[in-house]
Image (cartoon, rainbow, N blue to C red):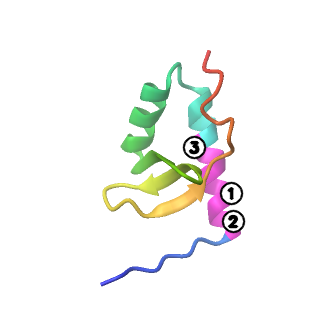
C-alpha cells in the first residue's frame, strides 16, 4: 500500500520556519536533530538536499535551504 501525501505551501512555510527557528537555538547539528525529534521531526540528507521528515514514518514534509546546517555558533 502506498501513501500519497501533499503539503500545501502554507504548511511547508510553517514547518521550514519552525525548523530554522529551532536551529538558531542550537549549538550543533546533533542538538538540532535531538530537539526536532522531540517535536516529531527528523532531518535526512538526500540527493535533493536536507529534508524534514515525520517520525516515525519518515514522510517527507519539506526541503530546507542549502545553508541551513552551516555556521553553528
Depth check, front residue: 50 or 32: 50
Depth check, front residue: 3 or 18: 3
Tell me the distance, in whole angstroms, between the alpha carbons under discs 3 and 1: 10 Å
Question: How many residues crowd around disc 2 within 10 Å: few (fewer than 14), some, or many (20 or more)?
Answer: few
Reply above or below: 9 against 26. below
Q: Mark 1 points at which residue?
A: 13
**Residue at 62% in and 28% down:** 24
Q: Position of residue 61 (x, y in %)?
A: 53, 61
Reply above or below: 37 against 58. above
Tell me the distance, in whole angstroms, between the alpha carbons under discs 2 and 1: 5 Å
Q: Position of residue 15 (x, y in %)?
A: 59, 54
Mark 2 in CB contact with mark 1 (< 8 angstroms): yes
Label 3 sits on a secondary structure element that is helix
Residue, far bottom: 1
Q: Where is residue 13 in the image (x, y as percent from the top left)?
A: 68, 57
Q: In which quarter of the image is residue 53?
A: bottom left
Question: How many residues crowd around disc 3 within 10 Å: few (fewer than 14), some, or many (20 or more)?
Answer: many
Q: In which quarter of the image is residue 19?
A: top right
**Residue at 38% in and 59% down:** 58
Q: Mark 2 points at which residue?
A: 10
- The tag earlier along the polypeptide, 3 or 2, is 2
Mark 3 in CB contact with mark 1 (< 8 angstroms): no
Q: Mark 3 points at which residue?
A: 19
Question: How many residues crowd around disc 1 within 10 Å: few (fewer than 14), some, or many (20 or more)?
Answer: few
The magenta stretch is 9-19
Q: Position of residue 55 (x, y in %)?
A: 35, 55
Left or right of residue 36: residue 10: right
- The tag earlier along the polypeptide, 3 or 1, is 1
**Residue at 62% in and 64% down:** 11
**Residue at 59% in and 71% down:** 7
Amino acid at each position: 500500500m502506498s501513501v500519497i501525501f501533499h503539503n500545501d505551501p502554507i504548511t511547508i512555510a510553517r514547518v521550514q520556519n519552525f525548523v530554522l527557528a529551532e536551529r538558531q537555538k542550537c549549538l550543533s547539528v546533533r542538538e538540532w536533530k535531538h530537539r526536532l525529534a522531540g517535536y516529531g521531526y527528523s532531518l535526512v540528507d538526500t540527493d535533493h538536499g536536507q529534508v524534514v521528515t515525520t517520525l516515525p514514518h519518515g514522510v517527507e514534509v519539506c526541503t530546507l535551504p542549502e545553508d541551513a546546517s552551516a555556521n553553528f555558533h
